[in-house]
Amino acid sequence: MDLQIKNLNKQYSNGVVALNDVSLTIGKGMFGLLGPNGAGKSSLMRTLATLQDADSGTVTLGDMDVLHDKDSVRKVLGYLPQEFGVYPRTSAIELLDHLALLKGFTDSGVRKEMVNQLLVKTNLWELRKKSVGSFSGGMRQRFGIAQSLIGNPRLIIVDEPTAGLDPGERNRFYNILSEIGENVIVILSTHIVQDVRELCNRMAIMNDGKVLYSGNTDDALLSVKGKVWEKKVDKADFQTYQESYKIVSNKLVGGKPLIHVFSEEPLNAGFELAEETLEDVFFAKINNLI
């Protein structure tokens, strides 16, 4: 079962074009959706999650029409938005039970067993009686994953899940997502390149509402292999390098800018060939260098 997105368009009332002829085919497993803030990722996620309508285009999940058969889609959908509200004084187990009831699980015995399994799966069993409002950011995100798994969904959408998490919580989150992604379609929308590299075999890059790349992460790396060069430069000289070279990215290392430059020809003047990274692909695509 694939998720087929064809020629999807969305323009808001203020004139902003959020989705511009977006077409993607997403199969079972982890799929990374990369893009800077404002790229259209969240607009696409909200459309797939049946929270907003598209202006034109089609989306199908297997034989379901996602844009027009919203009730059927919601029965097989798990969604963890960038921000989700909770009842702060309600315990994790009570709130998860309530959400399961809202999703149509009226048998208390079935609901109890499912809730207990989800709490164990997301490493929240020991915290089940604590109020969700007292959870750390990482705990709250794990609770978000638990509620998105109610009813064994076939499509799970996760929007900017690791923003603000410390390294330990991020790793725990990675492990949970990896396990989930073995059996269902999981779309991971993020601007954090490391998330996609760690978790996904397939990915897309979006900017200004358009899909700039869609394919295998290893193929994406091959597109810049042997074409990215790095050099540490003085801050005072950075502007000169920016005018003379196609700078992919830069970051401070030891107080001096380390620049990555895209060039299909070997560079001298102290440049060394850099090991290609998904971040290089991301910035090269965003800046129209490849």
Image (cartoon, rainbow, N blue to C red):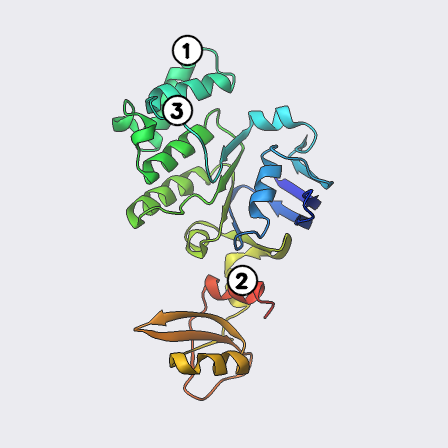
Dot 3 alpha-carbon crowd within 10 angstroms: few under 14, some 14 to 19, many 20 or more: few
Q: Secondary structure at mark 3?
A: loop
First-in-chain label (1 vs 2):
1
In the rendering, which numbered label is found on residue 20? none
The residue to which callout 1 is attached is: 108
Dot 2 alpha-carbon crowd within 10 angstroms: few under 14, some 14 to 19, many 20 or more: many
Tell me which amino acid carries mark 2. Answer: Ala
The part of the image, by quadrant, that contains residue 155 is: top right
Can you name the residue that lies furthest to the bottom here? 269
Can you name the residue that lies furthest to the front here? 14
Q: Is residue 1 visible?
A: no
Relative to 205, is 180 on the left or the right? left
38 w.r.t. 256: above or below: above
Q: Residue at x 42, y 16 (%)?
A: 111
Q: Quadrant of the N terminus?
A: top right
Tell me which amino acid carries mark 1. Answer: Ser
Q: CA distance from mark 1 to mark 2?
A: 48 Å
Q: Nearer the viewer, residue 263 or 180?
A: 263
Q: CA distance from mark 3 to mark 1?
A: 21 Å
Q: Residue at x 69, y 45 (%)?
A: 11
Tell me which amino acid carries mark 3. Answer: Tyr
Q: Secondary structure at mark 2?
A: helix
First-in-chain label (2 vs 3):
3
The residue to which callout 2 is attached is: 220
